[in-house]
Image (tube, helix red, strand yellow):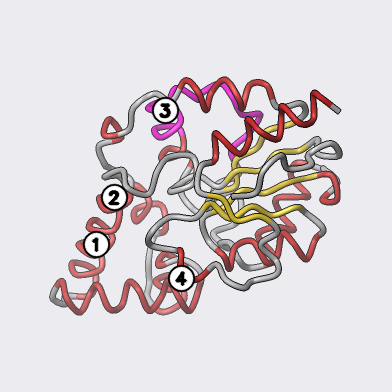
Amino acid sequence: MTSSPDLSHVDTWVFDLDNTLYPASANLFPQIDLRMKTFIAELLGVGLDEAFKIQKAYYHEHGTTLRGLMINHTLDPDAFLEYVHDIDHTVLTPDPALRQVIESLPGRKLIHTNGSERHADGVLEALGLQDCFEAIFDIRAGNYIPKPDPNSYARFLASHSFEPNSAIMFEDSVKNLKPAADLGMVTVLVQHETNAAAADPDIHCHHVIEDLTEWLQQGVYARNSA
């Protein structure tokens, strides 16, 4: 873990949502995964095993399963989002330590997610972070173009008008950090057991951490002590 990170120049804090603001071990994203597989099976008339293969193939080829379905099949994206995000967010619990450190961050705080705003609202409310962020830039705001497509980042910047060189982005996806690094943002990979193998040695991941709250606390302390 990187200690005492230099955050002195940062005035815009960009956070991914799933498996970044909450631990990947929480039983939340597996619910979404199952509902995506079920949706695809019903849409295409295939078994769950085949639906799972299609789901993962589209995710790897297009950035999100939704994007792959939109390109390859007639699909109402809002129907997909409503279905797959109809989950139990109460498996998450409030995180007062994370709330405290996010509240202490100077400057703007934004969410950039490939999920829906409805889902983001559910996650933030369950974590007790519902009023900690200026805005949520979701997949609809990105015109259904997901990270890591550079167009998603361009729309995000156009919507919220910040300087990338004074911004930092937190993500659990290695590939989603490359466009941010290319724009000049500091990038932080939140590592967990399901993404650990992908982290080394990607140079566009400026920091690789395991505990978001602890790392932010160290950074805020170092900034305030400077």
Estimate the spatial distance between the alpha carbons at disc 3 and disc 4, rounded to whole Å: 28 Å
Residue 41 is one of the magenta-drawn residues = no
Residue 70 rendering spot, x and y as whole percentages? 44, 70
The C terminus, quarter of image: top right
The amino acid type found where label 1 is placed reads Phe
The amino acid type found where label 2 is placed reads Tyr
Residue 133 is one of the magenta-drawn residues = yes
Q: Mark 1 or 4 closer to N-term?
A: 1
Which residue is identified by label 3?
Answer: 127
Total count of labels: 4
Q: Mark 3 or 4 closer to N-term?
A: 3
- Residue 10: quadrant of the picture: top right
Which residue is identified by label 4?
Answer: 197
Instruction: Please state which of the two labelled residues, at mark 3 or mark 4, is closer to the viewer.
Output: 4
Estimate the spatial distance between the alpha carbons at disc 1 and disc 4, rounded to whole Å: 29 Å
Callouts 3 and 4 close, C-beta under 8 Å = no
Estimate the spatial distance between the alpha carbons at disc 1 and disc 2, rounded to whole Å: 8 Å
Residue 18 rendering spot, x and y as whole percentages? 44, 47
Instruction: Please state which of the two labelled residues, at mark 1 or mark 3, is closer to the viewer.
Output: 3
Which residue is identified by label 1?
Answer: 39
In this view, the residue in front, 158 or 128, is 128
Label 4: element kind: helix
In this view, the residue in front, 109 or 155, is 109
Q: On the picture, is 111 further left or further right than 66?
A: right
Residue beneath the point at 41% across and 35% down: 123
Callouts 3 and 2 close, C-beta under 8 Å = no
Q: Mark 4 or 2 closer to N-term?
A: 2
Magenta residues, as a range?
A: 121-136
In this view, the residue in front, 87 or 172, is 172
The amino acid type found where label 4 is placed reads Ala
Q: Residue 83, which numbered label?
A: 2
Q: Residues within 10 Å of mark 4 (few under 14, many from 20)?
A: few
